[in-house]
Image: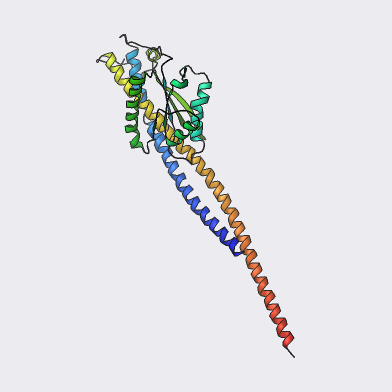
């Protein structure tokens, strides 16, 4: 009986330690979710400004060459954002399945004929392992940034690598796959970074908040080039920040479920411990009573 009680005490102690770890991870995930969401939201106005600028330049009377013809024989670049750490539910499995199977089967035009020509880049150790498990080779792998301040240098490095793939391998299409947070969890998202639909932007007429019509003095090609660089940076930054927010949203949900399961298990263990302890006490009392009765009978038998 004492061995059973000792075992239950160890299980309860381990469960309480695990519960403390889960509570800490849940608090960190809850804090990180809002932090990364705010980082993505802070770029919305800037992104809108860049979009307005592109609309102005492309809808001007100046002629800017627009090449919308994509060579389907050239490789496409797939950037799959995931996580470096586990304990995030099906966060990584879902985005890998979406990028390598679901999205392609939907017949999107920007997918084209990837086959062996597709260049797949995994961002996050957990995504890298799952892409390899799916039988897909990786051209390169990256670790996800671990803080807000680390996102900017990471995006700058990523832009440099994209430019290298464009110049060395002739990449003309760049697709982004990432999870983004939503009410009750997260959902996979696909975006086309390249090619940019300049013809669509040229036709776009965004509303202005004043009667003053925008204008510019620098050359149109230089302005478009500068705005597109900002457009690429903001698009990648938002994808990264939203993916990190979704990761922590998924981890928060996983930790909440784990905390519930641990608490239920602790209640079961504590109830079992109380039952075993009560049974042990009852058995000891019965032994004492039996011993007392035996002693009293012995004393009675010895009396003349």
- Tell me the quarter of the picture where residue 212 sits: top left
Whether residue 187 can be seen here: no
| Horizontal side, residue 296 vs residue 116: left or right | right
- Tell me the quarter of the picture where residue 71 sits: top left
Q: Nearer the viewer, residue 150 or 72?
A: 72
* Quarter placement of the N terminus: bottom right
| Horizontal side, residue 208 vs residue 86: left or right | left
> In this rendering, is residue 24 above or below 68?
below
| Horizontal side, residue 4 vs residue 191: left or right | right
Give percent across and percent down for residue 67. Answer: 37, 12
* Quarter placement of the C terminus: bottom right
Q: How many numbered tags mark residues here?
A: 0
User: Which residue is the extreme one toward the bottom?
Assistant: 304
Whether residue 202 can be seen here: yes
- Point 48% across, 26% down: residue: 99
Give percent across and percent down for residue 253. Answer: 51, 40
> In this rendering, is residue 197 above or below 296?
above
- Point 59% across, 64% down: residue: 2
Give percent across and percent down for residue 266. Answer: 56, 53
- Point 50% across, 23% down: residue: 103
User: Which residue is the extreme one toward the left?
Assistant: 217
> In this rendering, is residue 297 above or below 121?
below
> In this rendering, is residue 89 above or below 201?
below
Q: How is the image coloured?
A: rainbow
- Tell me the quarter of the picture where residue 281 sits: bottom right
Q: Nearer the viewer, residue 18 or 96?
A: 96
Give percent across and percent down for residue 4. Answer: 60, 61
């Amino acid at each position: 009986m004492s061995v059973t009680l000792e075992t239950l005490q160890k299980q309860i102690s381990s469960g309480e330690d695990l519960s403390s770890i889960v509570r800490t991870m849940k608090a960190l995930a809850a804090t990180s979710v809002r932090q990364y969401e705010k980082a993505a939201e802070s770029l919305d106005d800037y992104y809108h400004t860049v979009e307005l600028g592109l609309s102005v330049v492309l809808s001007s009377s100046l002629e800017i060459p627009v090449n919308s013809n994509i060579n389907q024989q050239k490789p496409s670049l797939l950037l799959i954002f995931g996580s470096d750490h586990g304990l995030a539910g099906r966060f990584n499995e879902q985005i890998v399945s979406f990028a390598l199977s679901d999205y392609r089967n939907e017949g999107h035009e920007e997918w084209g004929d990837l086959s062996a020509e597709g260049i797949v880049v995994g961002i996050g150790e957990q995504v890298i392992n799952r892409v390899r498990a799916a039988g897909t080779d990786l051209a390169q792998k990256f670790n996800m940034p671990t803080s807000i301040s680390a996102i900017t240098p990471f995006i700058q490095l990523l832009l440099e690598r994209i430019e290298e793939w464009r110049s060395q391998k002739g990449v003309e299409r760049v697709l982004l796959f990432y999870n983004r947070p939503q009410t009750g969890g997260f959902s996979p998202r696909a975006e086309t970074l390249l090619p940019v639909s300049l013809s669509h932007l040229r036709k776009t007429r965004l509303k202005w908040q004043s009667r003053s019509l925008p204008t510019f003095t620098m050359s149109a090609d230089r302005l478009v080039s500068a705005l597109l660089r900002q457009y690429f940076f903001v698009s990648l930054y938002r994808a990264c920040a939203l993916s990190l927010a979704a990761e922590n949203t998924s981890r928060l949900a996983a930790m909440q479920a784990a905390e519930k399961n641990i608490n239920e298990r602790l209640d079961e263990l504590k109830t079992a411990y109380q039952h075993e302890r009560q049974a042990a006490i009852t058995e000891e009392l019965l032994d004492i009573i039996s011993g007392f009765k035996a002693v009293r009978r012995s004393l009675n038998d010895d009396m003349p």
